[in-house]
Amino acid sequence: MESIIRDIKLAKSGHEKISWVDRHMPALNAIGDKLKADQTFKGKTICVSVHLEAKTAYLAEVLHRAGANVIVTGSNPLSTQDDVAAALVEDGLTVYAWYGATDEEYFDFLNKSLDHHPDIIIDDGGDQVHLLHTTRADAMENLLGGTEETTTGVNRLHGLDKAGELKFPMVAANDSYCKYLFDNRYGTGQSTWDGIMRTTNLTVVGKKVVVAGYGWCGKGCAMRAKGLGAHVIVTEVDPIKAIEAVFDGFEVMPMAEAAKVGDIFVTLTGDKDVIRGEHMKNMKDGVVLANAGHFDVEINKPELEALAVRHFEARHNIEGYELPNGHVINLLAEGRLVNLAAGDGHPAEIMDLSFAVQALAAKYILEHHAELGNHVYVLPHEIDTEIAKIKLASMGYAIDTLSEEQRKYLNLD
C-alpha cells in the first residue's frame, strides 16, 4: 500500500531535520546500533502513531534499520511536519499523514496504518488502541502488544485494564523514570513556552501565568514560567499536589479566582473542561489560552464559541474571540497541544531518553509477549538504569559505584 503524504518534494528539508536530531540523540543511537546489529525486529511490522516530527521520524528510522517494516502516522492533526513525512517515504518507510488533517482524514490514516496488521504498535494518546478495541479487531491477528507514550494514553489503558477489557499487553513507556522525569518535566516545560512565545511574540516576564495541573508536566511548565520571570499561579484538584506547588513557591487558587487575574493560561491536566465558559466570562481583555494536554478538550471551545460575538484570526495559529463585554480571548493552536501544534515539540536531547525507552519497550514486548497477560506494564527498573548510564556517559559524566561492603550494608546482594 502506497504512502499518503502532502508532497514528496519536501523531503530535503525533512532529511536535514532528521539529521540534526540524529546528532543529538546519543542514547537512542547506542541502542539503535545494537538493535541493528542483531536485526531485532526482522520480519516484524511496527505501526508508529506518535506526533510526526523529526525526533519521532528518527525513532522510526532506528526501528527500520533494525529490520522492521515500519508504518508511520501522526497522533495529532496539527503536529505532523510534511517535510519530515516526505523524508521517511524517501527512506523506504510507509507514511500516512499530513499537516492539518481533518478528523475524518486523521482516523482514515490511522486505519490505513492498521491495515498492515502490525506485530507491535507504538501509540501516543491511545487512538490506535481505541480503534483496535472497537472497529479494527481484524487488525489484531498478528499483534503481540504495544507501548504507550503519554499520560493521557496510559490513563485510557488503565481504564481498559481495570474493566478487564484490554485485549493485548501494553507497556506504559510514559511511566518509566527515563521518560516522565525528563520528557514530562523538562521537555514539556521548555517546548510549551517555545510554542507560546514563538506564536504570540509576547513577553512572559511580569505576567501572571496560570498553570492548570501540577503533575510532572505542570511542574515543568510552572518552573520554566518562573524562570522566565512570570508570577505563577497553580490550579489543582489534588490537595497533595497543591501543597507541593505551595512549597515550590507558587500561589494556589481555584480556577474561578485565577480566571480573574491571569494573563496566560496553560492547561496540563489530561482532563476535559478545565477552563469553561463560566471562567472565560471573567477573564481580562487580551488573555492567552494554551493547552499542553494531549487532546483539545481541556479548554471548552464550544462554550468559548457560544460566548463570542466575533471570531477572527488574530495572528497565525491564534484565534481571537471577542466577548459581549468587548474583551478578547486569544486561543492558541485551536486548543491543541501547543508545543507541537505551534512548535517543534520537545528538545532532541529529551526525546533521546523517551525514544530510547520506546525502542526498548518494543523489544521487551517482542521478547516477553508470551509470558505477559493482557495488562498494562512498566519496564523493569534495570532498563531505565541502563538508559541513564548510556545518557550520562554521552554527556561526559561519571558516577560512583558501591563497594561490596556498602552493598552488604544495604542488603543489595
Image (tube, rainbow, N blue to C red):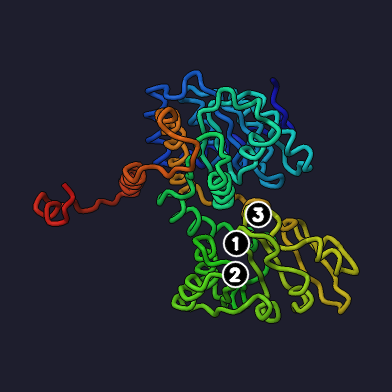
Q: Which residue is mark 3?
A: 337
Snapshot quadrant of residue 317: bottom right
Q: Helix, strand, or loop for circle 3? A: loop
In the rendered image, residue 236, in percent from the top left (x then y), is placed at 57, 71
Image coordinates of residue 309 in percent, x first then y, are 90, 69
**Kind of element beneath mark 2:** strand
Mark 2 vs mark 3: which is more N-terminal? Answer: 2
Give whichever of discs 2 and 1 has the lower sequence position.
2
Marks 2 and 3, Cα distance to the nearest angstrom? 15 Å
Spot the residue most to the right.
309
Position of residue 132 measured from the top left corner of the image (x, y, whole percent):
64, 34
Query: Is label 1 or label 3 in front?
Result: 1
N-terminal-most mark, 1 or 3: 1
Given the image, on which type of amino acid does mark 1 rest?
A: Leu
- The reply to whether dot 2 and dot 3 touch (C-beta < 8 Å) is no
Rendered residue at 63%/66% (across/down):
266
Residue hosting label 1: 268
User: In the rendered view, would you say 197 is above or below 413?
Assistant: below
Q: Residue furthest front?
A: 164
- Residues packed near mark 3 inside 10 Å, few (<14), some (14 to 19) or many (20 plus): many
Q: Are marks 2 and 1 in contact (CB under 8 Å)?
A: yes
Amino acid type, callout 2: Val
The image quadrant of residue 127 is top right
Question: In the figure, is residue 197 to the left or right of 143?
Answer: right
- Residue labelled with disc 2: 211
